[in-house]
Structures are given as structure tokens and as C-alpha cells.
Image: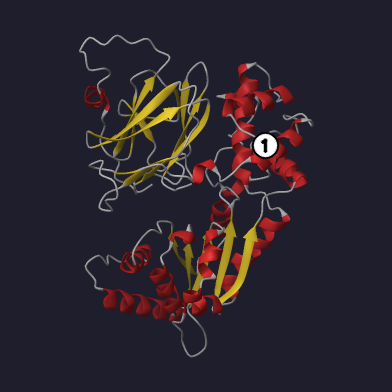
Amino acid sequence: MYIEQFKLKDLPFRLSPDPQFLYLSKHHARAKAYMESTIWFTDGFVVITGEIGAGKTTLIETFLHELDKDVVVAQINQTQVSATEFLQAVLVQFGFTPFKMKKAELIATLNTFLIEQNAAGRKVLLIVDEAQNLAPKVLEELRMLSGVETTKEKVLRIILAGQPELNEKLDSPELTQLVQRVRLRFHLTPLSEADMQAYVLHRLEVAGSAGRKIFHDDCFPVLFRYTGGVPRLVNTLCETAMMAAFNEDRDYVCLDDVKSAIEELRWVEFGRRGAPRDSEATGSFDGATGDTGNRAGPKLYVGSQDEDLVLGKIIVAQGGATVGELPLRLGRMVIGRTPDNDLQIDSRFVSRHHCQILTTREGCVIEDLNSTNGILIKSKRVRHRNLNDGDVITIGHHELLYIDERAPRVDTTGSGPGLDRSLATGQSEAVESQG
């Protein structure tokens, strides 16, 4: 790992929302203050929006990390649900098993719980991330829940966080009553160039740089030009640049390393980009059968990619059935549960940002992003591994077969590399804890 070469104690630019790495720009500090205000005021929603990768989730995790013990929290991340499923998800967060309850019973149980918590002197907070995906009927249920009150005050605090589409949805005529309940709305913008430089230096310092100059000063204008100050893009470009320096056996990053990273990632300047690539979806597959559009099982979504220089591929399977395939090109591919990943596996056994695959011209490396259930190869949990042709990576209930297109292969069966044979040698027990 490059952290030893750079004399660091931790990975400075991983994508997992680690509160200790939070850099509070002026805008991020204001958004965090708005979240904190929900603990003291109960007279409405707080809505935080921002583009993909702006840092909303890291803010939420930091805010949750600092809450007092008298605050009871329900955090909802899966938002493509019906109104009944949403109420069930909230009750599950509060420790109930509500799956046989009808809607009226769900509402009554939730109202009773809120009143009891208030009587016991506890504050109840509901945080909904990816709220732009909520259906209007679900948002209406939220409005009704926000109205639960005692003779003195409302008893449920609510924070909605989501992409800019959430604002468009809230401003629609049918949600006028809901918008009237919104007390604070804030849009999280990308970092300025000065803040972006401070952000990079902050993350390096937290990771153990101890004031050493790891990025040359002439790197920062180029970093900003290609990332637009979007924190997730900054992380991606900085880490790839550090890998480029690592390959050159240097303990600092120069401008040539940043240019090499841009070339490997095949990025254009931020101002010339259209819609963010990782917000697009080119296919959805049922996690068990491969049928499209079936909501019964976990779903897998594949992000769009450039069409040249395929150096390998990942074949995704569940229960022995192939459910998707993703080509590997130069750069980084992040795998996880939420839509902002390059490869989304929508399963409760997969963490928000579970792992990443770094592809270079020489080979591919898989790294765990501090996931709950980890990644397994040959039934052994690994944190970092150079992938070999035919490796099977187990993530929860899914298997990912790695095929290296650089490797010469001889087909003696006439059927090509067999997915079933490879999976049979690499399967391990499913991990039953939730990611």
C-alpha cells in the first residue's frame, strides 16, 4: 500500500464517510449548524441538498457521531419504497418488527412511540438520506408524522438530505403543505479553490502527514480545474495521483502525477462535463433472476463507462445466476449499496461504499473501504489484494468474478471461461450482518 511510502497512518482519500476527515468549509459548517438546530427546535423540517459527492453523507455521519445519548435516531437510506414500506423501515430503526402490521397499525405504533419517548425526556430524530427518491405519497406521510405533538411541542425532528432534484420535488404544487413545514433549506455547493486546497491538506494531516508537503503547490489549480471542488471527485483524483507517484517510487505528488491520473481516469475539465457519470444508470437486474424491473430481490445497477481500452471485466452473480457484467477501464471503480457508486448492488448485506477496484495497465487491485461485512476471496477476508484472473470476490450474497483481459487464455472446453465453475471454487458462506 502507498501509505507506507508516503509515511501515512491511514488512507487520506477513501470515499467512506469518516467523520474524522470532515473539513468544515464555510458552507459545510452552515449546513451542519442547520442540522444541529433540529435538536433545539421542533417546529419544522430541515432540508439539505447538494450535488453527488458534495459531502452530505459525511456531514450526516459527523452530526450523528456528536449527538447526545438522549437523542433517539432513525436513519433511512433506502428511499425507493412505498409509504407502507417507509413506515416499516422507520419502525425497524426504532427496534420494532412491523412487517405484519397494516398501515393504520404502523401509524398508531409510531405515534405512540413518539409520545412515550417525549414523556421520557428523549428527543426523536428522523434522518432521510437520498430523499430525492421519495415518492409524493411517502413525503405526505412524513408531513403527517411531523404533526405528531404534545400540548407543548412537536415530538419528531426531521432532516431530509438529497440531490438537487429534491428541491424540484418539494416545489411541486401537490407538496405545498409539506413545504410550509420546512423551516430551513440549504444547498451545499462545491468547494472554492482555496477551500479545496485546504480540504486536501486537512485530509493528509488527519492521515498523518505531520505538515509534510506531499502535493506540490502547482498541483492544486489543476486539481480544481478537473474536479470543480466536488469533494468526491477531489478524493478520486488525489488518490489516483498518489498511486501514480507510488508507481514512480516517490513520496510526493508532482504535477506530472496529477496529469497521469487525469489521463488514466479519462477525465475532461469539470466545466466541460455534462451530467455526472455516476448518476446515470444503463440497466437494472433482479439480484436473483436477472429479470429487469422486479422489486422482489436486491437490484444491481451498472454505471456508464467509456467504450475503449477494456483491461478486464467483473461478472456479477447471485445464487449461481449471472445478474450483470461491468468492463474495467483505467481508473477507479467503487462498489456499494447506494446510487452514487460506479457499481451499485442494492442489498442490505452491502455497505454504502463497500470496496473499490483500481485498474492500471499492469493489473487490478481491490481494496475494502472499511465495510461492515468485508470482501472475501477463497473464504478469507481481505483488505487489499492484487487480483488474479479468475478470482471470485464475495460481497454479502453476491459473487464477483474477475476476468483479466490482459491474460492469455486457452479454452479447452469450447465454452470460454466458465462462471459456474469459477464460482463453485470461490463461494463462501454469506455474511448475515447488515452492511
Q: In this rendering, is residue 318 above or below 131? A: above
* Rendered image quadrant of residue 119: bottom left
> Percent from the top left, x then y, of residue 48?
58, 62
Q: Is residue 111 visible in the rendered structure shown here?
A: yes
Q: Secondary structure at mark 1?
A: loop
Looking at the rendering, in which quadrant would you find the N terminus? top right
Q: In this rendering, is residue 325 above or below 278? A: above
> Percent from the top left, x then y, of residue 342?
47, 39
* Rendered image quadrant of residue 228: top right
Q: Is residue 122 visible in the rendered structure shown here?
A: no
Report whether 73 appears left or right of 90: right
Q: Residue at x 48, y 57 (%)?
A: 130
Q: Residues within 10 Å of mark 1 (few under 14, many from 20)?
A: some
Amino acid at dot 1: Glu
* Rendered image quadrant of residue 219: top right
Q: Residue at x 74, y 47 (%)?
A: 195
Kindly identify which residue carries mark 1.
269
Q: In this rendering, is residue 64 above or below 124? A: above
